[in-house]
Amino acid sequence: MSVVYAGSAGVYAIDMRTGSPIWHVNSNRAVTTGPVVAPSGAIFAGADSTYGIAADGQVHWTDSSLKPGEAGLTVLGYDGMFEAATDDMAAVLTGDGSYVWTARSFGKITTAASSPSGMLYVGTSTGGIFAVR
């Protein structure tokens, strides 16, 4: 089955062939970042919290300290993601919600992307670009 994930008043998994919902995870606010899917199948989304969801729709973890920022979520080349949160907070988390690192040294993050080789690129409001491995 081919699945597409969408964010609205929560995260939805939708059968691409039929358009029928497969599952839905509620959130207290609209999803503003993601959902994004890691190579492992872990699904990440940001609304009132950052959510880690399994492919079957089970919420594995939530982190209310990471409020989604303007740059959103970026999947990394393993079972993890980069969150550019509000208050100039940045974090890398694994699929189980464990922190790999956090930083406030980038300033206001406006964009982020990752390459297949695992390099994370972070752009800031001052025009700075950081490459992090």
Image (cartoon, rainbow, N blue to C red):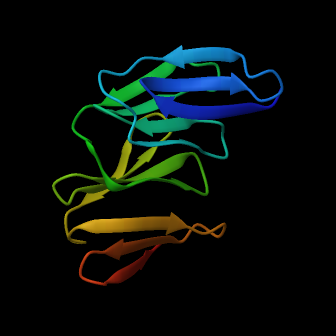
**As displayed, is residue 110 above or below residue 6?**
below
The quadrant of the rendering that contains the N terminus is top right
- Camera-nearest residue between 13 and 38: 13
- Camera-nearest residue between 12 and 89: 12
Identified at 41% across, 46% down, the residue is 93
**As displayed, is residue 127 above or below residue 107?**
below
Identified at 55% across, 56% down, the residue is 76
Q: Position of residue 121 (x, y in %)?
A: 46, 73
Residue 57 appears left or right of 61: right
The residue lying furthest to the left in this view is: 87
Q: Is residue 58 visible?
A: no
**As displayed, is residue 46 above or below residue 59?**
below
Q: Is residue 73 visible?
A: yes
Identified at 21% across, 38% down, the residue is 65
Q: Quadrant of residue 109?
A: bottom left
Q: Position of residue 28 (x, y in %)?
A: 30, 21
**As displayed, is residue 9 above or below residue 107?**
above
Residue 2 appears left or right of 41: right
Q: Quadrant of residue 2?
A: top right
Q: Position of residue 34 (x, y in %)?
A: 48, 43
Q: Position of residue 26 (x, y in %)?
A: 42, 17
Q: Quadrant of residue 129?
A: bottom left
Identified at 55% across, 35% down, the residue is 43
- Camera-nearest residue between 65 and 79: 65
| Tally of numbered tags | 0
Residue 115 appears left or right of 60: right
